[in-house]
């Protein structure tokens, strides 16, 4: 493994007098850097917050090409289990592919997930090339990166400039698996969706809302942000709505 990019390191904040924990999960080709302001806001509520760095992320695209959905899920699951051992209520807050992983955790680790906040979550792609993913994923090539889709020119996401086809195929395969598990998701769910997203089709949010079994589902549309909304103009909306969502569902 190559060295971690400065700023892409995992982070955490210890809660003060609270047994509420929050697991933050970043997106594909990104890093915990895209979630740090969000994490700081949630930690200011007195909650314990952790943001792991998913395998293959925050280092090099070569590292990414050696990982897949099982690796990404495994890292997040380990963080969730550790957090659940310390906190009576654990919530997941996630961006993009992090939302895919969060939904998977909520489906497979239901007893450990008190609620889920997903920003621009993804369970399918409408790119016509995606149908050829199993074949293209065997080729030693890469495509232009998908990161740092942000409307605010003063912000930047730490991400890879190119994505190995193998990694893109692994993501699509993982999305297919999670899509089939959506009906197993029963946790309270807050979905935040950017109307202008150049990475994930906004229809993903409606699809998720329609296919989970949760009875407590709320959708909020973000009017001024692109895909990495946690670093964009609507970040305060995300921070405030997610904090309110958690506070109203904490059981301590």
Image (cartoon, rainbow, N blue to C red):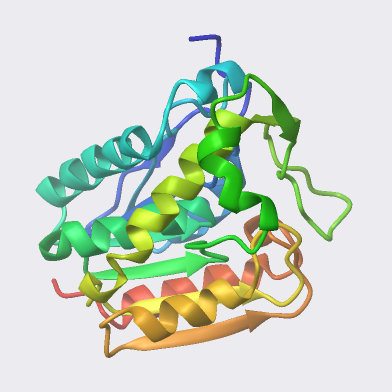
- The correct choice, above or below, for 39 with respect to 238 in the image is above
Report the residue at 44% width, 87% height from top: 218
Q: Nearer the viewer, residue 52 or 71?
A: 71
Say which residue appears at 44% left-offset and 59% top-offset: 99
Q: Farthest residue in the bottom direction?
A: 215
Q: Is residue 202 left or right of residue 223?
A: left
On the question of residue 97 being in view, the answer is: yes
Across and down, in percent, residue 22 comes to: 33, 56
Measuring from the top left, give residue 165's x and y in whole percent. Answer: 62, 32
Residue 242's x, y, as percent? 46, 72
Q: Quadrant of the C terminus?
A: bottom left
Residue 120, above or below 21:
below
Q: Can residue 228 be seen in this view?
A: no
The quarter holding residue 175 reads bottom left
Q: In this view, does 103 lie to the left or right of 61?
A: left
Q: Residue furthest right?
A: 153
Relative to 16, 35 lies left or right: right
Q: Which residue is drawn at 73% across and 38% down?
A: 145
Could you tell me residue 19's position as x and y percent?
Answer: 18, 59
């Amino acid at each position: 493994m190559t060295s971690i990019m400065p700023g892409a390191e995992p982070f955490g904040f210890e809660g003060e007098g609270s047994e509420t924990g929050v697991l933050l999960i970043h997106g594909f080709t990104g890093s915990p850097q895209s979630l740090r302001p969000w994490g700081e806001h949630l930690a200011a509520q007195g909650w314990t917050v952790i943001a792991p760095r998913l395998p293959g992320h925050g280092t090099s695209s070569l590292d990414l090409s050696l990982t897949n959905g099982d690796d990404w899920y495994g890292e997040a699951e380990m963080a969730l289990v550790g957090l659940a051992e310390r906190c009576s209520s654990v919530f997941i807050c996630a961006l993009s592919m992090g939302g895919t992983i969060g939904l998977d955790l909520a489906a497979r680790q239901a007893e450990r997930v008190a609620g889920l906040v997903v920003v621009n979550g993804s369970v399918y792609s409408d790119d016509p090339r995606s149908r050829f993913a199993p074949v293209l994923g065997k080729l030693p090539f890469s495509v232009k990166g998908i990161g740092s889709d942000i409307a605010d020119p003063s912000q930047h996401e730490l991400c890879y400039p190119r994505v190995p086809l193998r990694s893109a195929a692994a993501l699509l395969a993982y999305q297919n698996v999670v899509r089939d598990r959506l009906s197993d998701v029963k946790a309270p769910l807050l979905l935040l969706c950017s109307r202008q997203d150049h990475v994930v089709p906004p229809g993903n949010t409606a699809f998720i809302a329609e296919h989970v079994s949760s009875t407590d589902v709320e959708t909020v549309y973000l009017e001024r942000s692109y895909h990495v909304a946690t670093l964009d103009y609507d970040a305060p909306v995300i921070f405030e709505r997610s904090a309110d969502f958690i506070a109203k569902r904490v059981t301590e």
